[in-house]
Amino acid sequence: MPQTVRLSDADNVVTAVTPLETGQDGATQLIPRGHKLATQDIAKGAPVIKYAQVIGYAAEDIAAGAHVHTHNLDFRNVDTEYEFGTNLRPATPATKQDTFMGYRRASGRVGTRNYIAVLTSVNCSATAARKIAAHFTDDRLAAYPNVDGVVAFVHGTGCGMAGQGSEGFEALQRVMWGYARNPNIGGVLMAGLGCEMNQIDWLVEAYGLQPGPLFQSMNIQDVGGLRKTVDLGIAKIEKMLPEVNKATRSECPASELMVALQCGGSDAWSGITANPAVGYACDLLVAQGGTGVLAETPEIYGAEHLLTARAVDRATGEKLVGLIRWWEDYTARNKGSMDNNPSPGNKKGGLTTILEKSLGAAAKGGTTPLTGVYKYAEPVTAKGFTFMDSPGYDPASVTGQIASGCTLVCFTTGRGSAFGAKPSPSMKVATNTEMFNRMTEDMDVNAGTILTEGKSVEEVGREIYQMWLRMASGEQTKSEAQGLGDYEFVPWQIGAVM
């Protein structure tokens, strides 16, 4: 392995592959693994360059060989002149159509799993939903081999919020509608209290949901209390099970896949190994006619100009810029900063500013044109590489991506995030071999081999893409094998709680 990695000839810092002692590779002081080393003198106020992009400004004079991190690097809000559609590189259509074994629904969409969902309209019905789902143990589901499970999707909101027309209310309704319509869901039971702001009847009417054998609803107040609600919910799902079990897998084209592109617990290697490899896998999926969905708007801050240049038209690029402006205002009025992210763990792993983190995070989107930009949990209808607005908080972000229609989740991590999602299976891509070896029960693919074994980004990208096809056909991910996904449903709560 090399001792340092330079990502561009334009850079004035390199990244330490291993801890550097004084005198190693030009270091004038100890450089922790994954951290940055100045390759030339950088004057106070001058830009620090990585990925051939500005990641911050020197807070003091920095001598060649010095450690560059939070103690001597300042963040500034971005002030960018945006270009639109100036870097369009359409994917070359695949010569061979790849397939997977999926569940084709009556809507024409294709699922990768077959769950029954117990969705709550409000926190007040969460206990009822949990009790209903808990009744359906593996023993009770043994007679229904095509049903992956009964899952309660509960949350802490649904009331004490502004009503119809408010950002928070509409986002919650999109999440509920999106989960009810996700093709990984074979049957739905919605459970409410009755007096909450988020009325089930409003949702059904607003989104055209059709009550029937596979879509049921009830309210605790109408049924007559918690115990009666749990009993009725169990009875309703028992009637659903034979119908949901009728679904069987059939051969489907890879063009039907929609993959959530996600990262968490990032480190300096995220933008060097795992994220570019996922980006290559996304390009392979787009070449098949499939869809990749990037999210976490605060984590593309400072890199959004790279995406607007890939927008298929100005309107699409302007939508992305509009999201950036909303987030600047949102953080300012809440007395925050866009540089609140990276987290302490990210910084320990070598990331210094949100600009540095964003440049690495954006690599998950590959190189093909940006075909659509969507609100949080809004249905993604465009094919190709797309973007959905969300916070950088992983559970809230993935919840929105699944509501938008994602049937698989691809999650890169450097520090080691133990994350899983239902109803869409989540695979984990480790950025470095050390963490992969330490957390082998949680990691599915080791992108650290790009450094430790000399594998190419393309080689690891193909490995990731092939796993997408296998997991879409039913192969369990490490997080599924450990039962993760029941507590990661976290709708983004926007606005005042009243």
Image (tube, rainbow, N blue to C red):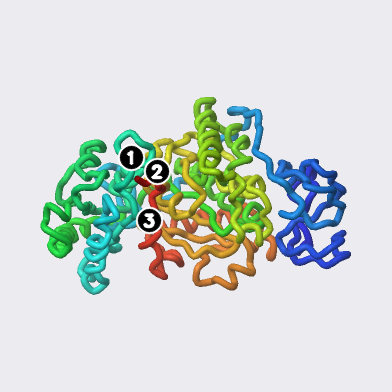
Q: Which residue is mark 1?
A: 162
Measured in 3D between alpha carbons, the distance from the residue under mark 3 to the one under mark 2, in whole angstroms, is 20 Å
Contact, mark 2 vs mark 1 (Cβ under 8 Å): yes
Secondary structure under tag 2 reads loop
The answer to whether residue 161 shows anywhere in this view is: yes
Q: How far from the left and from the top, in percent, is residue 479?
A: 44, 65
Q: Earlier in the sequence, mark 3 or mark 1?
A: 1
Whether residue 146 is situated above or below residue 52 in the rendered picture: below
Q: How far from the left and from the top, in percent, is residue 416?
A: 56, 65
Labelled disc at residue 496:
2
Place residue 125 in its image quadrant: bottom left
Measured in 3D between alpha carbons, the distance from the residue under mark 3 to the one under mark 1, in whole angstroms, is 21 Å
Q: How far from the left and from the top, in percent, is residue 368?
A: 56, 38
Q: How far from the left and from the top, in percent, is residue 58?
A: 78, 46
**Residue in the foreground of this view, choosing between 58 and 53:** 58
Place residue 302 in its image quadrant: top right
Whether residue 442 is situated above or below residue 495 in the rendered picture: below
**What type is the residue that disc 3 sits on?**
Phe
**What type is the residue that disc 2 sits on?**
Ala
Q: Which residue is mark 3?
A: 489
The residue drawn where x is 52% and y is 63% is: 417
The answer to whether residue 257 shows anywhere in this view is: no
Front of the two marks 3 and 1 = 1
Whether residue 120 is situated above or below residue 88 in the rendered picture: below
